[in-house]
Image: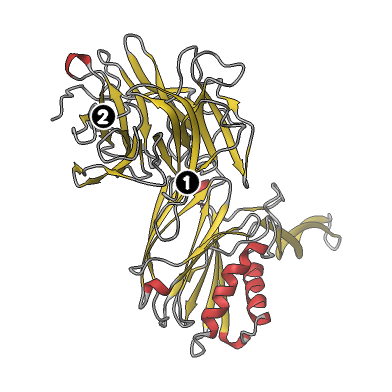
Amino acid sequence: MNRYCWSAFLVLTGTLCLGQAKIRKMPNNINHPAINVSTPYISFDGNTLVFISDYGEDNTLIMNYTSKIDAVNWKDPVVMPKNVNNRLNYLKGFALSQDGKTLYLTSQKSGGLGGYDILSSTLMGTVWSEPKNFGSPINSNKQEGTPSVTADGNVMYFMRCDQMNVSAASGCKIMMVKKKTNGQWENPVELPPNINTGNSQVPRIMGDDETLIFSSDKFPGGKGGMDLYVTKLNGNEWSQPVPLDFANTTGNDQYISATSLGRYLMKEAPGQRKTEIVELLFPSDIKPKGTMKVEGKIAAENPGAAYISVFNQKDQSRVYNGRPSGNGTFTLYLKEGGVYDLSVEPEKDNFTFFSKKFDLTGEKFSLSSNENISLKPLRQGDTIELTGISFQPLLFELTSGSTQELRKLVRLIKGNPSYKFNIEVSLYGLERDSVKSNPELTEVTSDSVKIVVPYQVVDSLVVPPVSKTMTRDSVVIKNTYSNDRTANQGIEILNFLVSQGIAGSNLTLSHRAVPEPVSENRRTVVKVTAR
């Protein structure tokens, strides 16, 4: 039953693109002035939140759940059902999966291996399933709890403790366990001694899979009680943990979370009357990398045979390769800081392919992308946008990152020898000037212009002499500077294709350049059309 009847409005304190506020508060249907709220766990996609409030009978602490109505507003919270919200739980030892559809619990529910074990419950429609114990090797005859799972669900961090009761634990170590390809779990391993110093608790892996936040009272220089620390995974090495001074207080600081955007840390904090949930801006030097979830559905003759790859165009490193499930679905994650070329290639050379570029170098990008992809035999008139082709700044030469896209194009053309192909290069954002007013204006065109020049002559045959105005034609050269490099860019593409054995007689080129007043929409687009 929904016992919440709080009015809802969103407290807006900053945006990503116009400057970020150092602290943001949750709306009043979550931060109610008469209710203490704490222990927020927000899903990586930012759409689901579980937290603790004292809104139970006789002000007992209970677990609450809410999800977003839209991209901004939250539904009124509801109390979680008793099958996942009961006195057998380690009260604050819960977590959510990336999409908020799986709830991880710490519980003494019967049938476990020790005292407290880690369990999971799945949201099926509007009902949370009966929790299931993970069993061995994750759980043991000790006390396991406070799990935190990576976005892809393949790695879990949790604490294994000597002592644990409903509200506290001691003698804890942070463990890490990986999922095998068959879905089973490997044996957990302890994190290194620079993290496990005697009582390290409540691990929280961030959406980038490399930033780990945890709490401890065994590090020197803390502010008091349990303090928060952050460590970064670089290859196989964890960095020396550093305190989160922007979030630590003189009390116990443990239960935090963050979306995969990695901009704000969510935690509890004292409000004017009651404890409330706030978001604190991560300092730039320790913030996690933002992460985008890409989900795809491939429609093809044999979708499971398609080949998926992702290259980072900045350094040409391959960041993902694999195949979709048998029904053509796939999920992958891209980290902030790269420009990625997602490629889906068919099994047969005469089929179309799919490409899309994801630029995650800016401050603003989406947390998710859904792609519906069709791979089919090429037909006359089919057009494919070649998003993986790019050109060097202020030049017409291709970047090295274009090679992968051009390789796919060569395969398609050779797989369809009966067609001719037109390469079209379009510039959206044409600029022109009579002088080279900015570095973008690299191209110059010169036109001869005929002008009429007046001049004076004196007619001495009449008395008195008369001055007359005469004219003559003159030619001057007029220069126009622009950023239209599309013709030469197209020639570069044709030259590459010919160098790979494509007959020049099967290729044509078209190009155009048009103004674009909105700077965000200015770009160069390359397409190929079968003729």
Q: Quadrant of residue 312?
A: bottom right
Q: Which residue is mark 1?
A: 177
As measured in the structure, the alpha-carbon distance from the residue carrying label 2 to the one carrying label 1 is 24 Å
Q: Is residue 3 left or right of residue 108?
A: left
User: What kind of element bears circle 2?
Assistant: loop
Q: Amino acid at mark 2?
A: Leu
Q: Amino acid at mark 1?
A: Val
Q: Residues within 10 Å of mark 1 (few under 14, many from 20)?
A: some
Nearer-N-terminus badge (2/1): 2
Residue 163 location, x and y as percent? Answer: 41, 25
Residue ID at (34%, 23%): 165
Q: Which residue is mark 2?
A: 88
User: What kind of element bears circle 1?
Assistant: strand
Residue ID at (63%, 78%): 497
Q: Are marks 2 and 1 in contact (CB under 8 Å)?
A: no
Q: Is residue 62 left or right of residue 467?
A: left
